[in-house]
Image: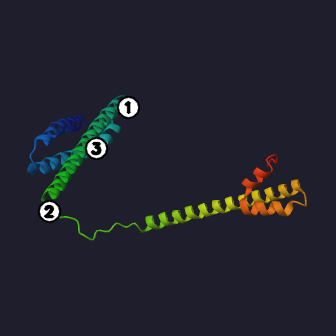
Amino acid sequence: MEPLYQQTHKRVHEIQSHMGRLETADKQSLHLVENEIQASIDQIFSHLERLEILSSKEPPNKRQNAKLRVDQLKYDVQHLQTALRNFQHQRYTREQQERQREELLSRTFTTNDSDTTIPMDESLQFNSSLQKIHHGMDDLIGGGHSILEGLRAQRLTLKVGALLGDRKKPFCFGLIQQFGTCIYFLICPTVILW
């Protein structure tokens, strides 16, 4: 087990040093370096599987220490795998942004067509519906106001008739109908309307 562990440990350190080459490699050799590192990581994972089996076969007094060392190697290799994936993702994002930038720079822009239309059918229908509702509410409020004015006029007529008695009722009704409530207050200033 010990020679395989030492070999695997050495490969992990080699991969760590190769990770630095990713930053300095040119675009043509970048894929080759990435593939090299990925192949080494895959090989280390196969070594780790073999090391796990061998560590379980160690004598009981060395088994826990052997498993701990294998787990530490596995942890280090997983971090290397994650670092490689992060680098590949950043590279892919950077390349995609460069492609988009080149597309924008190479595109020829033209003016808009003269018959540009903006779809506003739903908004227009909604706005006209709101206006109809608004006018309907105004009509409803106006009708209610007219009804209240009519009730006030009836109340005034009944009060004048009750105050003046039956003999002056036709005279009062005529005045109210001709000149409105202002004349009534001029003739009978003592009457209080409730």
**Near-viewer residue (150 or 139):** 150
Q: Amino acid at mark 3?
A: Arg
Task: Tell me the distance, in whole angstroms, between the alpha carbons under discs 3 and 1.
Answer: 18 Å
Q: Amino acid at mark 1?
A: Pro
Disc 2 crowd, CA 10 A, few/some/many (<14, 14-19, 20+): few
Disc 1 crowd, CA 10 A, few/some/many (<14, 14-19, 20+): few
- Helix, strand or loop status at disc 1: helix
Q: Residue furthest top?
A: 61
Q: Is label 1 or label 2 in front?
A: 2
| Label number found at residue 99 | none
**Near-viewer residue (31 or 104):** 104
- Residue pictured at 72% horizontal, 53% vertical: 182
Give coordinates of residue 23: x percent, y percent.
14, 41
Q: Is label 3 or label 1 in front?
A: 3
- Helix, strand or loop status at disc 2: loop
| Label number found at residue 108 | 2
Task: Tell me the distance, in whole angstroms, between the alpha carbons under discs 1 and 2.
Answer: 74 Å
| Label number found at residue 60 | 1
Q: Amino acid at mark 2?
A: Thr
- Sequence order check: which comes first, mark 3 or mark 2? 3
Q: Residue furthest right?
A: 166
- Sequence order check: which comes first, mark 3 or mark 1? 3
